[in-house]
Image (cartoon, rainbow, N blue to C red):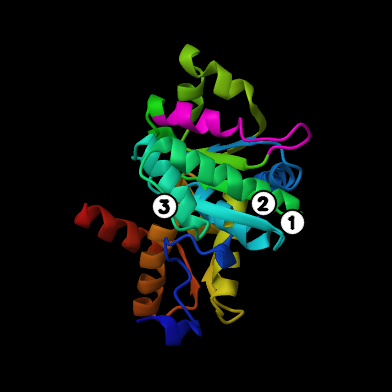
């Protein structure tokens, strides 16, 4: 509704994990670089944690988009599955026709695929999102996948991305073997107030906003106070803020429009 008024090509504050909109704060850049390093250098297990809405999924999609074509990838978005279902999901995402119905058949097929990729000079990576929801049984299955290796290389790199609860899960005694195999760890913290302003400006720019469009300092301050630096919450607030700015006939949006947006959100809640 407000796209034409602000000169936008698309909505700037959608909550879908579009890597084009990824804002590289210092910590997001560091996590991005660590994930690329861990995958490209065959480090085996890699852990990425962060609060709900901190940008983990968007970051993972950006990593996938930036990997070499010599790296074959699979993305598991639904971790509430059995060990066998997880294997089937991985095989399917690699574009393989799943053979057999039991776990052993799936592992043999996966191992053959990984060895074939190794012979061709390729690497393989699997990202498991919302990994804090994996059951202990599936966690153990994931650990066993790390046994698929040669004397020199890990055949498959596995990124476990999840909420802070994932770290607590991995601290359990029964999962110590899995924790010990994690070679790269990254943790996303909320954005600072300054980064929140930069984040908002970045998304507006990607969406094609006119140069004079934005939120002033006081507006950003209010958004930060409400969202606490969580990107997903910032998006939800700013979508309402843009509408309030449109109704008020403003291009540079101020505190009154943010207060109006927050009041509307609280009324809905």
Q: Which residues are magenta?
A: 138-154
| Disc 1 crowd, CA 10 A, few/some/many (<14, 14-19, 20+) | few
Q: In the figure, residue 14 lies in which quadrant?
A: bottom left
Lower position in the chain sequence, tag 2 or tag 3: 2
Percent coordinates x, y for residue 190 in the rendering:
54, 42
Q: Can I make out residue 79 in this image?
A: no
What SS does tag 3 mark? helix
Q: Are marks 2 and 3 in contact (CB under 8 Å)?
A: no
Q: Nearer the viewer, residue 108 or 158?
A: 108
Pointers 3 and 1 in contact (C-beta within 8 Å): no
Residues at marks 1 and 2 touching, judged by CB atoms closer than 8 Å: yes
Q: CA distance from mark 3 to mark 1?
A: 44 Å
Q: Residue at x 62, y 21 (%)?
A: 180
Q: CA distance from mark 1 to mark 2?
A: 6 Å
Image location (x, y in percent) of residue 105: 45, 41
Task: State the residue in front, 250 or 199.
Answer: 199
Q: Is residue 145 above or below residue 231?
A: above
Disc 2 target residue: 116
Quadrant of the frame with the N terminus: bottom left
Closer to the chain start, of discs 3 and 1, is 1
């Amino acid at each position: 509704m407000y796209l034409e008024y602000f000169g936008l090509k698309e909505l700037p504050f959608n909550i879908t994990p579009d890597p084009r909109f990824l804002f590289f704060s210092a910590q997001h850049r560091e996590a991005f670089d660590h994930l690329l390093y861990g995958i490209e250098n065959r480090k085996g297990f890699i852990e990425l944690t962060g609060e709900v809405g901190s940008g983990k999924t968007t970051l993972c999609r950006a990593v996938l988009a930036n990997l070499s074509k010599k790296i074959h990838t699979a993305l598991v978005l639904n971790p509430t599955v059995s060990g066998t279902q997880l294997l089937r999901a991985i095989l399917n995402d690699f574009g393989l026709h799943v053979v057999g119905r039991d776990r052993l058949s799936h592992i043999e097929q996966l191992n053959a695929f990984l060895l074939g990729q190794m012979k061709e000079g390729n690497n393989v990576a699997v990202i498991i999102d919302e990994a804090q929801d994996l059951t202990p049984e599936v966690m153990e299955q994931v650990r066993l996948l790390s046994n698929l290796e040669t004397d020199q290389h890990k055949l498959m790199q596995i990124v476990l991305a999840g909420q802070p609860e994932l770290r607590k899960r991995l601290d359990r005694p029964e999962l110590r073997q899995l924790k010990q195999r994690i070679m790269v760890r990254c943790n996303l913290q909320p954005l600072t107030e300054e980064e929140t302003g930069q984040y908002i400006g970045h998304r507006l720019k990607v969406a094609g906003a006119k140069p004079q469009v934005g939120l002033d300092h006081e507006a950003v301050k209010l958004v930060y106070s409400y969202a606490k630096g969580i990107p997903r919450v910032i998006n939800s607030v700013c979508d309402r803020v843009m509408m309030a700015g449109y109704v008020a006939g403003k291009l540079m949006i101020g505190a009154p429009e943010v207060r109006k947006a927050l009041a509307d959100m609280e009324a809905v809640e």
